[in-house]
């Protein structure tokens, strides 16, 4: 059963059509992958679904309710969280304080309760230097903190936008394990990624986007051999 249903979604910037009549669903408690070349519209799609950009045309149905015109903070409260390619933490806050912000957002927690919950989320993510200055965190730790901030809002669905970018092979494996742990907690995961090994290992289903349109959908092994996909995306890497 779909937790998120996208119907005829279109996003235009002036005369530029960034997303064109996109239709797909995200099933409850699956790991869905979204792939495509740079500039294909992947992040724009997530920005529209999460409410950062307004819809030009189409519908977004979440948990059976139409959220098409809701602002992003309401969508977040209803259970949609996302990370960003460029991490922008609150630099005046330490690690646990950044995560506490998510625990305070719309949940009515006291500072003490927010800190307790944030500590648990940090431990779940393998982040134990709670008071660490974020300028001293590694790339992996910053990415984990970004995910922790998203998890602090208690999402039903989390969109992970290129969280593997810039990681070493060992760090990528650690992040793959982290995504599996999140999924095991009952969170539906949608991962936008260029690292095909990650998509192959993690996802149950893949959507391929090119020039704002879905050109393929299905299991990775199936879509990765389709000529359209090879020419549009996979062929870029030779």
Image (cartoon, rainbow, N blue to C red):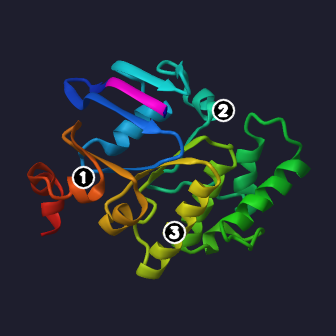
Q: Which secondary structure lies at badge 3? A: helix
User: Which residue is found at the position 28% from the left and 57% from the top?
Assistant: 220
Query: Marks 1 and 3: in contact by CB < 8 Å?
Result: no
Residue under label 2: 77
Given residues 94 and 185, the one toward you in this image is 185
Crowding at label 3, few (<14), some or many (≥20) Cα neighbours within 10 Å? many
In the image, taking residue 233 as reference, residue 146 lies left or right, namely right
Residue under label 3: 175
State the extent of the magenta-drawn residues as a range. 3-8
Q: Is residue 14 above or below residue 144?
A: above
Horizontal and vertical percent position of residue 42: 32, 44
User: Which residue is found at the position 18% from the left and 60% from the top?
Assistant: 234
Crowding at label 2, few (<14), some or many (≥20) Cα neighbours within 10 Å? some
Q: Nearer the viewer, mark 3 or mark 1?
A: 3
Horizontal and vertical percent position of residue 48: 41, 32
Upstream in sequence: badge 3 or badge 1: 1
Horizontal and vertical percent position of residue 19: 27, 32
Quarter of the rendering occupied by the C terminus: bottom left
Given residues 142 and 162, the one toward you in this image is 162
Upstream in sequence: badge 1 or badge 2: 1
User: Which residue is found at the position 42% from the left and 79% from the top?
Assistant: 168
Q: Nearer the viewer, mark 1 or mark 2?
A: 2
Given residues 31 and 79, the one toward you in this image is 31
CA gap, disc 2 and disc 3: 26 Å
Residue under label 1: 38
The single residue placed furthest to the bottom in the displayed view is 170
In the image, taking residue 107 as reference, residue 137 lies left or right, namely left
Horizontal and vertical percent position of residue 148: 64, 57
CA gap, disc 3 and disc 1: 22 Å
Asked whether residue 7 is drawn in magenta, I would say: yes
In the image, taking residue 229 as reference, residue 87 lies left or right, namely right
Given residues 134 and 175, the one toward you in this image is 175
């Amino acid at each position: 059963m779909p937790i998120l249903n996208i119907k005829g979604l279109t996003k235009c910037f002036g005369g530029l059509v960034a997303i064109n009549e996109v239709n797909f669903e995200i099933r409850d408690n699956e790991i869905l992958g979204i792939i495509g070349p740079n500039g294909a519209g992947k992040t724009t799609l997530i920005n529209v679904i999460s409410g950062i950009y307004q819809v030009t045309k189409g519908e977004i149905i979440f948990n059976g309710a139409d959220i098409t015109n809701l602002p992003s903070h309401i969508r977040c409260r209803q259970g949609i969280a996302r990370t960003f390619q460029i991490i922008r933490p609150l630099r005046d806050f330490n690690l646990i304080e950044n995560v506490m912000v998510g625990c305070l957002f719309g949940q009515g927690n006291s500072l003490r309760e927010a800190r307790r919950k944030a500590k648990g989320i940090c431990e779940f993510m393998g982040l134990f230097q709670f008071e660490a200055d974020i300028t001293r965190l590694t790339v992996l730790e910053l990415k984990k903190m970004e995910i922790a901030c998203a998890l602090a809002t208690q999402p039903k669905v989390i969109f992970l936008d290129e969280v593997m970018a810039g990681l070493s092979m060992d760090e990528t494996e650690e992040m793959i394990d982290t995504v599996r742990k999140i999924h095991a907690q009952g969170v539906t995961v949608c991962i936008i990624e260029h690292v095909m090994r990650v998509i192959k290992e993690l996802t149950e289903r893949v959507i391929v986007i090119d020039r704002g349109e879905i050109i393929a959908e299905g299991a990775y092994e199936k879509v990765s051999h389709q000529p359209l996909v090879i020419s549009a995306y996979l062929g870029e890497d030779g």
